[in-house]
Structures are given as C-alpha cells and as structure tokens.
Amino acid sequence: TSGAAIYVQCPRDGRCNLRQTPAVEGSLVAMNPHTGRVLALIGGYDFRLGDFSRVTDAHRQPGSSFKPIVYAASLEPCASEGQRGCGLTPATLIDDAPFAVEAGDGTVWAPDNYNRDTFLGPTTMRVGLERSLNTMTARLVYEMGPERVFDFASRLGIYDPSKRNLAVFSLGLGVGETTPLRMTTAYAMLVNGGRRINPIFIDRIQDRDGVSVRRQDQRACDGCSAPWNGQGAPVIPDVREQVVDPITAYQVVSMAQGVVERGTATVVKSVGKTLGGKTGTTNDYKDAWFIGFSPDLVVGVWVGFDTPRSLGEGEAGGRLAAPIFRDFMAEALKRETDTPFRMPAGVRLVRIDARTGQVPNASTVDTIIEAFRPGTEPTEDFGSSPIIIGRGETGFPGVEGGPTQPNQPGQPKQDDGLGGLY
C-alpha cells in the first residue's frame, strides 16, 4: 500500500521476514474483579509508535457490550410500587418485533436487529442477550426510561453522572462513548457480586529504605498483627459498597455465560473453562468489542481505527475481539483449576421451558436451569398466558408492532449485536 511502513529482517540464513505496522489498532486490559488490580494493560500495537493508551483514554461507543448493563438494570428489584421495567427475570418474555419510538426531537428512532427483518416474537431475556437482539433491548429501555439506564450505568462508573445528555433511548444499544477500562471495571463489579471496585495500577510505593510510603489497599485486617497463639486465621472485613444487588449480578453473569455457550461468542468455548462475556459491534463495523470473564479474571478487548472508520463488512466483535480474548484466556488460565461462578445466597435454581420461560409441560422441547430471585420463579398455577413485555406496543402511536409469533430464523451470525443506529 502506498505510504505503508514495511520492515525487513534478514537473519544470517539468508531468509527474510517482512513486518508491516498495521493501520488498525486495539487494546486489552485484564483485571482482578475482587480487588480491582490491573494485571495486564495493552494500550495499542506498539508503545514506540505513540504513548496514547486506548484502554484508559480512548472514548468509543461500546455497542452491544453495553447490553448486559441494560439487562442488569431491569433485573434489579423495583424501588417503588408501580415502577415499570424492574424486578424482571432471565425468563421474562420480551416481544422481539419491530419497534419505533419518538426520540424527542421530532425524529423517530426505529432500531433493527443484526439479522435485518428477522424477529423471534416473544423471547426470554436470556435468549435476547445470547443473540444480542436489538429490538428487545430497545423495549427494555422504553419500559425503564433512558434516565434509569443512565443512572445505573453511572453507578458502575461507565459514565460520569454529569453527562446526562447521554440519557437517550439509543443509549441501550451502546451509543454513549466510554473507555475500555470503564467498561471492564463495570463488568468486574457484576462478576464479584455487585461490589464496588476501582482499578488499581500501583499496589504500593516504597522509599529507598523499603518503607511503604503509600499503600493502595487500605482495608483493615482483624488479627493480622497479633502474635500467633493458635487462633483462627486473620479476617479482612468486606467493606466494599454494594452497588448492584448480588442476585441481579449473578443472573447477568449466568446469562453472559450463555453468550459463550450458545450465543454470539461460541468461538470462546474452546478455552475449555467456565467463561462468560458479551460481544459488541458498532455501526458500520467501526468498533469491535469483547468483554469476558472467568470467576476471578475480567478481560476487555477493543479493536478499531483511531480515526473511526469501518473495519470491513462483517468484522464484528465475535470475529475480531473475541478470538483475542480466547487466546489470552487460554494462556492465562491453562494452569488454573476450573471453577463455577459463585452463586450468592437466596438464588433459586429452577428448571424451565427454554422457549416460554415457564414450567415445562408435555409440549416442551428444550429445558434450561434458570436462576431466580425468591418469589419470581414460575409455578404450575402461573397460567397459560405469561406476561409479555411490549406485546403489541411500539412506543410510538400509529406504528405497527409487527409479529408477536416467532418466525423461523436460521442460526444467528457470529455476532448479531450492532450498536449505534441499530
């Protein structure tokens, strides 16, 4: 290509290797979700080409990697009687159908799914996240109101509370710019059970005599300085702020595990460990994301151009970013024992019909064990007509709601989660 920098390296054997600096950039950050310690950070292709960190300083649209935040907000218990779009479950049915809403400036916002003009009708929230269905996410934002979604994201540090101009309907599909570090930290708080953490880059600073003049970890330790007399182990009290209900956090983690097992990130399954995560792709394939995790490690990956432009047709998060995560985790976890995600007290595991979200019956084809908050699980006497959020509604008077019965779509593409205008 004209103007490209090509490097030639010729060892003594006479064979030459050609290396070319790529135009596309990328970043990766790995974090301990329990402490916030940043274990690895790659801010770009080569530090010698520039010290700009795309982990900490690049503000980009997260696309569908933002959807778990929307789902988490809707799973939180209702704060008041009559509040809409709260206290839902992974088995709640949302109508995957054409949707349009007046944006407030005289325009109409009508998001489409990645597989255009293909809709599943009433679909469980779990499947909606696994397949990254845009219209379902849009209906959730409409039910809750974009302000509540923004406030929830701000609690997790994705956005500064002062940027309330981001509280628009399309926020749910990831149009609000943020950094990979902020997104990865938010995911970490879901993985650790909803406790607040902050990224830690430096554990401590010592003077020339080895005396610590600054220590990042300021937690108290009961019994750490006591002489050993056969007493129990020292205890470090957990005083971290609870920013997300622990059952909500576990439900989202479980749903994100389904993204890897059955959804848009099946390429990650080859690691062979318990993993979850979410793909993200923005309009015109300008940004490719994957934020994924094991029970004790969270990794965020972003790929794109510094000056936003298309990465190419079909170059989505599941195709570009997820394989980077896969290769990183395969190495990082190869000596680690596989462990399940930690389930908080009170979660009720119930086998349900995977399609209807209800108690299995004679017509059930497939079942799944789902995580419920006590009192929200389906029962035998629930009835044959479950509540479907958004059925027959579009949010905008005069616009047809589209089909409410499932079509027969083919298998989802590798990543069916475009953000931005989709």
Image: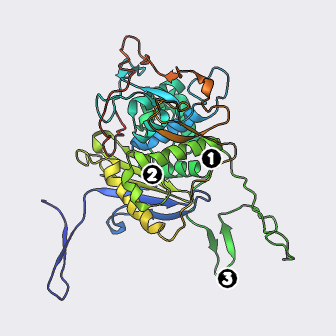
Q: How many marks?
A: 3
Residue that extends furthest to the bottom in the rendered view of this protein: 12
Give the residue type at disc 3. Answer: Asp
Residue hosting label 2:
291
Q: Is residue 261 visible?
A: yes
258 or 301, nearer to the observer:
258
3 or 411, nearer to the observer:
411
Residue at coordinates 54% horizontally, 48% vertically from top-left?
186
212 or 312, nearer to the observer:
312
- 35, above or below 307, in the image: below
Please state, as top left, top right, bottom left or bottom right, where the C terminus lies in the image: top left
For marks 2 and 3, give the one nearer the viewer. Answer: 2
Task: Assign a secondary structure to mark 1.
Answer: loop
Residue that extends furthest to the front in the rendered view of this protein: 362
Mark closest to the chain's N terminus, 2 or 3: 3
- 136, above or below 232, in the image: above
Give the residue type at disc 2. Answer: Ile
Residue hosting label 3:
209
Residue hosting label 1:
194
Please state, as top left, top right, bottom left or bottom right, where the N terminus lies in the image: bottom left
Local packing at callout 1 (Cα closer than 10 Å; few below 14, some 14-19, many 20+) is many
Give the residue type at disc 1. Answer: Gly
Residue that extends furthest to the right in the rendered view of this protein: 229
- 226, above or below 366, in the image: below
Instruction: Tell me if 144 is positioned left or right of 245 in this view.
Output: left
Residue at coordinates 46% horizontally, 55% vertically from top-left?
56
